[in-house]
Each structure stands twice: as structure tokens, then as C-alpha cells.
Image (spheres, rainbow, N blue to C red):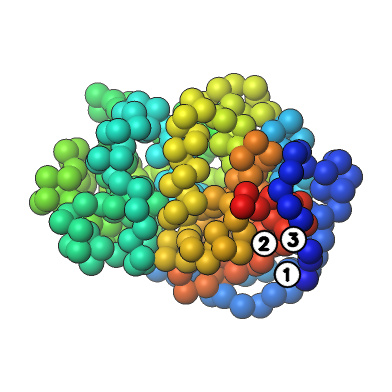
Amino acid sequence: AGVEQLVSTGALPEAARVDELVASAHERNRWVADGVVADYIPALAAADPEAFGVCVADVGGSVHAAGDVDVEFSIQSISKAFVYALVCEVVGHREALARVGVNNTGLSFNSVVAIELNDGHPMNPMVNAGAIATTGLVPGDDDADRWAFVADGLAAFAGRELRVDEEVYASEAATNERNQAIARLLASYGRLDADPGRTVDLYTRQCSVLVTTRDLAVMAATLADGGVNPVTGRRVVSAGVARDTLAVLASTGLYERSGEWLYEIGLPGKSGVSGGLVTVAPGKGGIATWSPPLDDAGNSVRGQRATAYLSRALGLNVF
Ligand code: DON
């Protein structure tokens, strides 16, 4: 991305320098015209293809922002990373490994074939099968309890109350036959104990939670900070769970492009079909971008470029 790769050392540069680089990551990529806005969830097709926000939150709680960082959009697949962390906190390292897995499928995020090829195993929590299996492990006596667990947990990561985009939720709920099929397939293999329909509904609702780019940067910084939200000072998950989540993101956060991502950016990340992208520099901070046009794997085009620039310019690559 036209910038020298610094070697990862110590903390982030001084605040004014980070501000400058965030502004530059936005400026150099805002006219990139590649990618296509997702439309398989009808309500997402209305997104503005020019919208673009870039934000860095560091583990000291400072936030550096450029562009449309305060516009809300549905979190979509990025919820998978944070719900996984919340569920791991409850079920523990071994159970999460056994029930959900940590290996890349090498196939698209909504693949049914991956399940079939792996004896019905969901494979990892960042593809739809594994995310639905993870949501199936959310504790609670009834739907309201389980929703409260997810909503409160996501709010703790963001440091503020979050609401659901009811239009996006209804639009996806009316068209998510494939996710319903995935849940039933998992159940047929004995890999989903919870009710498949209710689990997909909870998963669809978690994907419809509205966040801003700024929220996502703080959520990413919470994982960077060993599970403590650096803005509120509140512990959301344990350090071990934050580490496990980052390991999963490194191997699977950008679906079948996760290898290329790690090769170019060298950090754990997670993308979503509404155009959000979060990246975590352990011990340093979180990067979040939002730009709806996606590549053919479902990852934001401008987001990947802006993040590659910041990873290099800030010397964040962990390798
Ligand atoms: O389940 C789905 O298809 C959506 N709720 C989320 C998919 C998603 O964000 C994939 N990301 N690139």
C-alpha cells in the first residue's frame, strides 16, 4: 500500500501521528471503486457505497477517527467474534474447541459443503455453521434470557447500549433459508443441542445489532486489551478468552482469504457483510473500518486496503 513496513515494537506512536495516519488511510482509499454492496439480505442493498469510516482505538482509551465513523450499520458477521468470546467465557476453552472448532474451512462463510466434508462438524465459529453452533451454546432459560446475554455482552464490548435494526432483522429473517438449513443439518449430526429455529433467530438478531465504526474500534481494543474495555475500564471477558478469540480470528476471520490477510496485514481480523472490518493489534489497540462494497469473499475492499496501510504505517504486524 505504498508505505514502508515498520517492525512491530512497543506501543503506538504519539496521538497526533496516529490521527494523521488514520486520516491518510481514509483519504488514500476513499475513491477506490472496486467491490459490490451485498444484496442477498434485501435491506443491506440500500447501503451507501461511498460511506467510509476509519477508526483506531488504543488500549489507553484514546480514539482516532476519520470519515463516517458515527453512522450506524448492522454488525453482521463481526458479531460472531464477540459472541464467541462471550460464550467461551461460559463454556471454557476445551468445550469451545470440541463443539465449535478452530480450523479454517477454506470455503465460503455460508458453505453447507464444509459441514458435509467434516462429519457434520461446524469447523470454526467465524463461518455461519460455527457461529450458529456458538449461539446455540448461549446460556439462558428462555429466549429473553439468551437475548439479554448477547445484547448485554455486545454492549459491554462497545461501552454503550446497542439497539437492533428491526428492518434488517426482518429482512434477513424472511430470507435466511440457508442458515435455517445449516442449523438443521448441524442438528441432524447431533452437533446442535438447542432448537435450530430459535438458535437461527437469535443469531439473526445478533447480526442485526447496530454499531458505528467507532464502536467497533472500541470492541476490537477490548480484545487487544486482554478483555478489558479501555474506555469504560470494565472487564468483559478474561485474558485467556481474549487470546483464544484472537487465535481463531487469525486463522479464520476473513474466511477463505484468511491466509492472504495474515500474510499482508499480520493481525487477527473479522469482516462482516455490511462492510465492517475489525482488526486487533494485541496489547496495542483495535482498528475498525466500514465501507459497504465487498470482494467476492464478502470482505470490505476499502477496509482491507485502509487496514493494510495502518498495519504497515503503525508497525502492527505481529510477525
Ligand atoms: O448470516 C448471514 O449471512 C449474515 N447475517 C452475516 C454474514 C456475514 O456478515 C458474512 N460476512 N462477510
Report the residue at 23% width, 67% height from top.
Answer: 113
Report the residue at 47% width, 74% height from top.
Answer: 296
**Residue 202 rendering spot, x and y as whole percentages:** 33, 42
Query: Which of 303/259 is in front?
Result: 259
Please state which of the two labelled residues, at mark 1 or mark 3, is closer to the viewer. 3
The residue that label 1 is drawn on is 1
Q: Quadrant of the N terminus?
A: bottom right
Report the residue at 76% width, 56% height from top.
Answer: 6
Query: Which of 165/225 is in front?
Result: 225
**Toward which corner of the image does residue 30 lie, by quadrant?**
bottom right
The residue that label 2 is drawn on is 308
Q: Are the residues flagged by discs 1 and 3 in contact, CB closer than 8 Å?
A: no
The answer for how far apart the CA atoms under marks 3 and 2 are is 10 Å
The answer for how far apart the CA atoms under marks 1 and 3 are is 10 Å
Residue 46 appears in the figure: no
Q: Mark 3 is on which residue type?
A: Gln
From this view, report whether residue 186 is shown above or below residue 162: below
Mark closest to the chain's N terminus, 3 or 2: 3
Mark closest to the chain's N terminus, 2 or 1: 1
Q: Which mark is residue 5?
A: 3
Name the residue furthest bottom.
34
- Name the quadrant where ligand 1 sits: bottom left
**Residue 253 rendering spot, x and y as whole percentages:** 47, 54
**Residue 164 rendering spot, x and y as whole percentages:** 47, 43
From this view, report whether residue 289 is shown above or below residue 215: below
Q: Are the residues flagged by discs 2 and 1 in contact, CB closer than 8 Å?
A: yes
Report the residue at 77% width, 42% height from top.
Answer: 12
Query: How packed is label 2: few (under 14 Cα within 10 Å), some, or many (20 or more)?
Result: many
Residue 192 appears in the figure: yes
Task: Classify mark 2: helix, strand or loop.
Answer: helix
Task: Classify mark 1: helix, strand or loop.
Answer: loop
